[in-house]
Amino acid sequence: MTEADLTPPTLISPHTRALPLLTLTDLRIAESQAMAGLPEHTLMSRAGKAAASFLQELVTRDSSVEKSKQKVWLIAGPGNNGGDALILATQLHQDGIAVELCMPVDVKPDDARWALDTARAAGVAITSTPPASLDSYTWLVDGMFGIGLTRELDGVFAAIARQLSQRATTRPRKGGVLALDVPSGLDSDTGTIIGGSDGVAVHATHTISFIGAKPGLFTAQGRDLAGTVIVAPIGVDSGKRTVVQLNAPELFAAFLPPRDFATNKGTFGSLAVVGGDTGMCGAPILASRAALYTGAGKVHVALLGEGAPPYDPPHPELMLHAIDDLPLDKMDALAVGCGMGHRERATQVMHDVLQLDVPKLFDADALNLISKDPSLAAEVTARGVQGDPCILTPHPLEAARLLGTDAPGVQRDRLSAARALAARFASVVVLKGTGTIIAAPDGRLAINPTGNAALATGGTGDVLGGIIGALLAQHLPRYEAALAGVYLHGLAADTLSAQGHGPVGLTAGELAPMVRSLLNRLFYPAADQ
């Protein structure tokens, strides 16, 4: 027995830490290296006990049902995930919690057979047929299939996945559904359901992820299916095998500029938001307001169209110009594309700004122009090759146009799509959507854990562009500006929703003041007087 087995299991909440996200390949390497120096069955024993510790913590939190009246139902699949469930059931049973485990098919691997013998010796109730109803159980545990599943769920396992998901999605007032390692039926690398639209996966309220966190738990459908994620390292060093990280302040906080007394507006840079063809000035105004609240020293709006207002009444601090009247080469950063339109004038502006030695972000219409014009695409790539990468912020459809594919193709493997865009355009890419992905041309990748459905409304993308643009103007490096902007944008939505202002009906304009509050609270707390 090792020292790790004599101490309480370590459980890590991942949402404020830049944890590595381990692909299936990373996990297999970590597992094999760890097992080489451990007694047999050690990792399965640790995984089951870590899950038991977490579930007991959840049971303790649930004051609506006394611990002695809690009933836990577990489903065990035929592989090692089923073995984890068997050890979990044994531990709960020994701790006085009523458990019943269903094993429709006998477990097969040696570790899982050992776990089955252990459970039987302890007196765990094991059946082969699931009950008609699971309503009498407070907690349900999915131990059917973990990582590495390659075929869609079918038969009894698909039926049970639907039963578990029904419990999770009816917002239970007591108990819930705990998935072991990953919700069964979910691709742990991509966050998509195995089998696509025809596939079935468990919708859990909680997931305990063994060894390390997995990318698929934080992006695409995985973010909904996994519920609250906790990580149990079980004594395995995940090392530095992966370049994918979970976005967190530790990745960008050191790059935020100090706010010393001896600073002025010039210290924090000038941003120009370029866009606003005739009748479309709302988008650049939204972006510009967000830039103000994110701390840019001066914010200009360079408008392509006619009939724009001379100033922004709620924010007269913004300086509105016809684009030909503003020297863009004197700016510290440019955010280009909001409401820009697709006219020949917009294309010419794109060519012009790509000649400037100023950090640039391209969004919205600018991305569509790049996807349609090979010469613009080549100019974007050339900037990156020369050491001046642009930031591109596409949603899935814009990403598909840039890659010459379709949106479903992008969504099937968001990490690969973001990586391909970053390589093709030698740019920092922000692939928006649930679990936004930030990719650098040097191979760095991060998945963002903040944000919710409150962002599914018009204008929030413009706000994100303004936030990142303001950080560029404050001289953050491209990748770190993207990380910080995406994190703060999502956290603003989370915080406002927690206060009752979302997810329904939150407007894009409400995000920027909350971003300001978060910046000051998290990174610029007032000094003690």
Image (cartoon, rainbow, N blue to C red):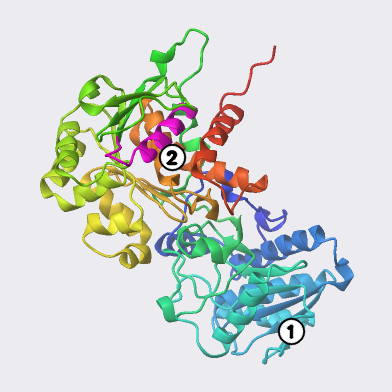
User: In the depicted view, which residue is nearer to us: 89 or 441?
Assistant: 441
**Residue corresponding to mark 1:** 120
Is residue 151 something that shows in the picture? no
Q: x and y percent of residue 174 in the render?
A: 78, 67
Q: Nearer the viewer, residue 233 or 416?
A: 416
Magenta-colored segment: predominant secondary structure: helix
Give the crowd class for mark 2: few <14, some 14-19, many >=20 residues within 10 Å.
many
Q: Secondary structure under badge 2?
A: helix
Proximity of marks 1 and 2: CB atoms separated by less than 8 Å? no
Identify whether 467 is placed above or below 232: above
Magenta stretch: residue 142 in it?
A: no
Q: Would you place residue 489 above or below residue 177 in this image?
A: above
Measured from the top left, where is residue 487 in percent x and y? 49, 42
Crowd around label 1: few <14 · some 14–19 · many ≥20 (10 Å) = few
For residue 377, side relative to residue 173 (left or right): left
Residue at the spot 70% in from the left edge and 74% down from the top edge: 140
User: Residue extending furthest front?
Assistant: 307
Segment colored magenta: 275-294
Foreground: 197 or 368?
A: 368
Look at the numbered disc 1 and give the secondary structure of its residue.
helix
In the rendered image, which residue does mark 2 sit on? Answer: 463
